[in-house]
Image (cartoon, coloured by chain):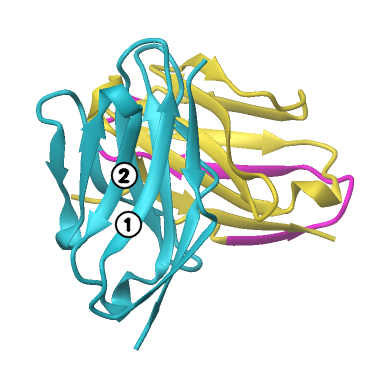
Chain colours: A yellow, B cyan
Amino acid sequence: KAGVTQTPRYLIKTRGQQVTLSCSPISGHRSVSWYQQTPGQGLQFLFEYFSETQRNKGNFPGRFSGRQFSNSRSEMNVSTLELGDSALYLCASSLGRAGYGYTFGSGTRLTVV
Amino acid sequence: AQSVTQLGSHVSVSEGALVLLRCNYSSSVPPYLFWYVQYPNQGLQLLLKYTSAATLVKGINGFEAEFKKSETSFHLTKPSAHMSDAAEYFCAVIKAGTALIFGKGTTLSVSS
């Protein structure tokens, strides 16, 4: 079965712009989580959506937002980009219960210049 | 809140040697624990998970981990390292109703 698909794979944006990243989970998975990965901070949790509702939220500013659609696909948006937003953004899908584990996509590499 | 500590940001072994990557967790209730591996420019791949069924968990590629509640540890081992094992390894913890939280990661280098 198809894995977690993230688009685009690479993105270059200018400071001050906004960006939208997309994630299509594994068929049947209702939970989608987003992570930011940087060399300095490691893997940091952004937010989790389950059945179109935000279930958990990490400690990121309001410039970072997300949503989930009825088909479980998810998008995350970052507004007013800053240089420090340059990172690998990873999406993970799950059936929704803690013990099932998460399957990750290959990520979107965002570079802000 | 739960947290994960990975001891040693970088571990180097020779090919054929034992691999031991350390992970300690902090949680008020028994959590679920995971080990993931990440190769350059890729996402995370699940190696194994502990969900309370058995304390010794076997995963892919010959890796295994033992859950020790008394030591709050979940160390990852492999009897004999291969060159292809060189990657970054992450320990992660989750409990019901919360998010999956990762350790800082350990980079494994394997020399011939």
Dot 1 corresponds to which residue? B20
For this rendering, which residue is in front, B34 or A69? B34
Magenta span includes A28: yes
Q: Is residue A28 visible?
A: no
Residue under the image location 23 percent in, 78 percent down: B16
Magenta span includes A9: no
Q: Under tag 2, what secondary structure?
A: strand
In magenta, the rendered stretch is: A10-30
Q: Separation of disc 1 and disc 2 at Cα?
A: 7 Å
Q: Image check: B81 left or right of B13? A: left
Residue under the image location 28 percent in, 40 percent down: A26
For this rendering, which residue is in front, A87 or A75? A87
Q: Under tag 1, what secondary structure?
A: strand
Subunit of label 1: B
Q: Above or below — where is B85 with respect to A111?
A: below
Q: Which mark is residue B75?
A: 2
Residue lying at the far bottom of the rendered structure: B112
Where is the C terminus of chain A found, in terms of image quarters? Answer: bottom right
Kindly indicate the quadrant of the structure image that contains residue A97: top left
For this rendering, which residue is in front, B57 or B13? B13
Residue under the image location 38 percent in, 17 percent down: A51
For this rendering, which residue is in front, B98 or B81? B81
Residue under the image location 29 percent in, 49 percent down: B76
Of the image marks 1 and 2, the number of the one nearer the N terminus: 1
Q: Are marks 1 and 2 in contact (CB under 8 Å)?
A: yes
Estimate the x, y position of residue A75 in percent, counting from the top left: 55, 35
Estimate the x, y position of residue B98 in percent, counting from the top left: 44, 16
Q: Which mark is residue A13?
A: none
* Amino acid type, callout 2: His
Q: How packed is label 1: few (under 14 Cα within 10 Å), some, or many (20 or more)?
A: some
Estimate the x, y position of residue A47 in percent, counting from the top left: 55, 26
